[in-house]
Amino acid sequence: MADEGEFLLEPAKDLRVGRYVLIEGVPCRVLEIETSSPGKHGAAKMRITAMGIFDGGKKTILASAHADVQVPVIKKRKGSVVSFSETSVQVMDSETYETYDLPIPDDFKGKLEAGKEVEIMETMGRKALSRVY
């Protein structure tokens, strides 16, 4: 099994919208995939558009459909909201009881309450809030 901060190699043709890929060392969620048909002298090309998990930046990569792309190993954990402010939330991991502060993504503003259960995504040594239950 891969450790924290590692990635796997996977053929670009196996990527799907909603999955994850590393672009320029940044873990991203795939938003769109455009595939061109193979030409006379080459394989099909893919344009993969994705959004950074942690920074929200839009990134694009061009690759041959048979080329390997880096896919980050992502761990998902459950936690409970201890407290929150306008910009950050303090979460306690349900398994390790470790607490840490995370920025609140715009999607979750107004949905957090103390004691509410959340899902935390961890990859490349960083954590982000990914779901509120």
Image (cartoon, helix red, strand yellow):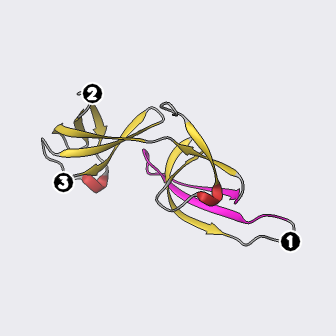
Could you tell me which residue is drawn at 66 percent across and 63 percent down? 46
Q: Tell me where residue 38 appears, x and y as whole percent.
A: 77, 70
Inter-mark Cα distance, 1 to 2: 56 Å
Say which element carries label 2: loop
Could you tell me which residue is drawn at 57 percent across and 58 percent down? 15
Q: Which residues are magenta?
A: 42-65
Give the prevailing secondary structure in the magenta stretch: strand
Could you tell me which residue is drawn at 56 percent across and 60 percent down? 49
Inter-mark Cα distance, 3 to 2: 27 Å
- Mark 2 is surrounded, within 10 Å at the Cα level, by few (under 14), some (14 to 19) or many (20 or more) other residues, namely few
Q: Tell me where residue 39 appears, x and y as whole percent.
A: 81, 71
Label annotation for residue 110: 3
Q: For the residues carrying marks 3 and 2, which lies nearer the camera in this image?
A: 2
Q: Tell me where residue 110 appears, x and y as whole percent.
A: 18, 54
Callout 3 amino acid: Gly
Q: Quadrant of residue 103?
A: top left
Label annotation for residue 40: 1
The answer to if 23 sits in the magenta stretch is: no
Q: Tell me where residue 41 appears, x and y as whole percent.
A: 87, 66
Left/right of residue 133 with respect to residue 65 in the rendered view: left
Q: Residue lying at the far left in this picture: please name it.
A: 114
Q: For the residues carrying marks 3 and 1, which lies nearer the camera in this image?
A: 1
The answer to whether marks 3 and 1 mark residues whose Cβ atoms lie closer than 8 Å is: no
Q: Quadrant of residue 121?
A: top left
Callout 1 amino acid: Lys
Say which element carries label 3: loop
Inter-mark Cα distance, 3 to 1: 54 Å
- Mark 3 is surrounded, within 10 Å at the Cα level, by few (under 14), some (14 to 19) or many (20 or more) other residues, namely few
Callout 2 amino acid: Thr
Left/right of residue 93 with respect to residue 67 in the rendered view: left
Q: Which residue is mark 2?
A: 96
